[in-house]
Image: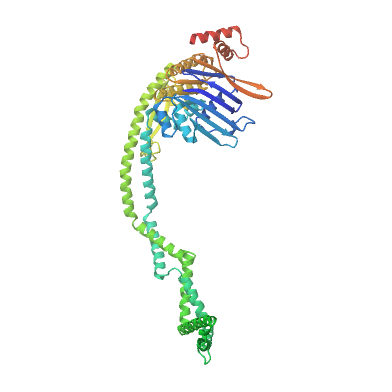
């Protein structure tokens, strides 16, 4: 139950505090005074989307706080699950602040929570019904939602959707690997050719670089042989070569190196140089002997590089990319060759899953058909009370069929659900959008809400101007029905009809005034005398006479 509401800087409301009570609470006021803003504020604190445009002009932020008295095991369990402490007095404090940059913060019992958690808990505390719900009733795609809600089908729907997703996934896998025989043979031929063409070349990583190095040597072989041979002769080929000269120098220093530590160090360095120079001479001689220039070798290298170039044009910019292409083609080839086996396996899986999907779909369909009968009976009882005794309601639950007249599985099952109505005896049942007026829609939706209210464990119901298109006796009946609902639940109703307002247990008036060029809205709890004046204003407009006041007083006393 919503017991207290505090609002700051929402639209024309600078600051507002209101206490609501158990039973039937009604809110009235002139058009534009701010009645709907109060409902918007309640929706905001319950986690609904809120625009920064709600923030009062000149303010940097808006704030709404609400206190609920709640002893529901379901709500307490949800709070505990989300790590929110439960107050001993049973009160739940919810706060939400909206900033001018679009950010918002939310708290429950002092603990900061995400908007999704706030919304999840808010739905367990309050059910808000506004004029847009009446219009939603006109769209047949919403009717399956109403029926499933009444039938408590959510758990069954979740199981069906889980199986539905599995079936669709298998179908997609089959589609991905299923191709026509002609396409399959064409693709196999192409892949086999590509694999064979790359395979027979026996190329390997870095081969191109090695070939280019070999080509460079062969192209410059004459110069290389000439200069390397000359270098070898200088090192170890002539009578007075570098190796011999260094060796003589080593022998000369060796005979005197023991006389000085400095000479010994020089001798050791020179000795190391002698060995290194000899090694260089040996390596250079070996290199000279290894060079075997052959024009055919160069031709072979050129041919190999040309082959790699042609492969690169087809399969990649480098040998590594060519080899990656080869690996991928091998995998595709293997996959297509094994696709028949895989398709048979997937088709077997699909058949088993379809049997389970069909069982769940039929179970869901049967539940809807049975629930629709009970729902129709209860709605017609409500409508009879609301002065619509001749109205007949029907909920059609028909299978979804394809063009081939086969059953189609959709995300919500195999059913098309639509509410049909006949407003007069002898008339055929037709869609709501073809027959129902605004007033009829209001009463039909109220009937549905009342039927659902008996099943739901939500303690607070808010009705925002659901009396659109209704007047006279019908309005009075709506008020009586709301008071009946309020025996077991808290009802807060925004209305513009005296017939409804006079029946409520508690009456509030939303008033707007302009002070120093600024608009302010407040809500006032009305005592008996104030209530009579408010009812007279609703009934009589600008000019309130003694007769109007007398009528308002009689209306109030009669309904008490």
Q: Please give left or right for residue 126 compared with residue 371 in the image.
A: right
Q: Please give left or right for residue 535 compared with residue 378 in the image.
A: right
Name the foreground residue: 468 vs 286.
286
Q: Residue at x 32, y 46 (%)?
A: 349
Name the foreground residue: 149 vs 173.
149
Residue 477 visible, this orientation: yes
Number of numbered labels in the structure image: 0
Q: Please give left or right for residue 512 compared with residue 107 in the image.
A: right
Residue 523 lies in quadrant: top right
**Colouring convention used in this rendered image of the protein:** rainbow
Q: Is residue 225 above or below residue 32?
A: below
Q: Position of residue 363 (x, y in %)?
A: 32, 34
Residue 225 visible, this orientation: no
Residue 204 lies in quadrant: bottom left
Q: Position of residue 321 (x, y in %)?
A: 46, 63
Q: Is residue 551 above or below residue 97?
A: above
Q: Residue furthest bottom?
A: 239
Q: Is residue 48 above or below residue 299?
A: above
Name the foreground residue: 175 vs 122.
122
Q: Position of residue 376 (x, y in %)?
A: 39, 23
Q: Residue furthest front?
A: 259
Q: Position of residue 231 (x, y in %)?
A: 53, 85
Q: Is residue 182 above or below residue 290?
A: above
């Amino acid at each position: 139950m919503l017991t207290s509401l505090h609002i700051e800087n929402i639209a024309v409301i600078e600051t507002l505090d209101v206490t609501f009570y158990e039973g039937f609470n009604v809110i009235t006021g002139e058009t534009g005074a701010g009645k709907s803003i109060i409902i918007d504020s309640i929706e905001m604190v319950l986690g609904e989307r809120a625009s920064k445009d709600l923030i009062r002009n000149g303010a940097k932020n808006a704030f709404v706080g609400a206190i609920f008295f709640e002893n529901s095991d379901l709500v307490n369990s949800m709070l505990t699950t989300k790590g929110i402490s439960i107050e001993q007095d049973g009160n739940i404090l919810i706060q939400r602040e909206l900033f001018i940059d679009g950010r918002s913060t939310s708290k429950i019992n002092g603990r900061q929570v995400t908007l999704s958690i706030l919304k999840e808990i808010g739905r367990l505390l309050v059910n808000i019904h506004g004029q847009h719900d009446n219009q939603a009733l006109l769209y047949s795609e919403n009717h399956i939602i109403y029926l499933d809600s009444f039938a408590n089908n959510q758990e069954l729907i979740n199981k069906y959707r889980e199986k539905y997703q599995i079936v669709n996934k298998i179908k997609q896998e089959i589609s991905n690997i299923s191709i026509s025989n002609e396409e399959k043979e064409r693709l196999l031929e192409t892949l086999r050719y590509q694999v064979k063409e790359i395979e027979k070349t026996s190329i390997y990583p870095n081969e191109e670089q090695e070939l280019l190095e070999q080509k460079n040597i062969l192209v410059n072989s004459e110069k290389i042989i000439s200069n390397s041979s000359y270098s070898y002769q200088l090192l170890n080929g002539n009578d007075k070569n570098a190796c011999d000269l260094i060796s003589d120098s080593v022998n000369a220093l060796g005979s005197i190196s023991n006389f000085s530590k400095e000479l010994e160090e020089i001798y050791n360095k020179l000795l190391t140089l002698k060995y290194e120079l000899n090694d260089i001479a040996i390596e250079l001689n070996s290199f000279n002997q290894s060079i075997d220039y052959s024009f055919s070798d160069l031709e072979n290298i050129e041919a190999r590089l040309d082959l790699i170039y042609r492969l690169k044009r087809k399969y990649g910019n480098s040998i590594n990319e060519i080899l990656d292409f080869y690996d991928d083609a091998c995998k595709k080839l293997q996959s297509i060759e094994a696709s028949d086996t895989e398709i048979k396996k997937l088709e077997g899986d699909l058949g088993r899953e379809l049997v389970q999907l069909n069982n769940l779909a039929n179970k869901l369909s049967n539940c809807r058909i049975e629930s629709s009968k009970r729902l129709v009976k209860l709605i017609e009882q409500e409508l009879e009370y609301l002065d619509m005794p001749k109205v007949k309601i029907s909920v059609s639950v028909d299978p979804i069929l394809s063009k081939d007249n086969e059953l189609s599985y959709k995300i919500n099952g195999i059913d098309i659900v639509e509410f049909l109505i006949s407003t007069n005896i002898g008339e055929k049942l037709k869609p709501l959008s073809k027959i129902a007026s605004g007033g009829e829609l209001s009463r039909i939706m109220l009937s549905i809400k009342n039927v659902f209210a008996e099943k739901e464990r939500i303690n607070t119901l808010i009705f925002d101007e659901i009396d659109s298109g209704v007047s006279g006796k019908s309005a009075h009946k709506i008020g009586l029905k709301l008071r009946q609902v309020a025996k077991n639940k808290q009802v807060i109703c925004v209305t513009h009809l005296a017939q409804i307002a006079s029946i409520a247990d508690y009456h509030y008036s939303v008033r707007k005034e302009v002070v120093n060029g600024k608009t302010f809205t407040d809500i006032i709890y009305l005592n008996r005398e104030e209530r009579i004046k408010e009812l007279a204003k609703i009934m009589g407009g600008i000019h309130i006479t003694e007769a109007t006041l007398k009528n308002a007083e009689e209306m109030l006393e009669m309904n008490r």
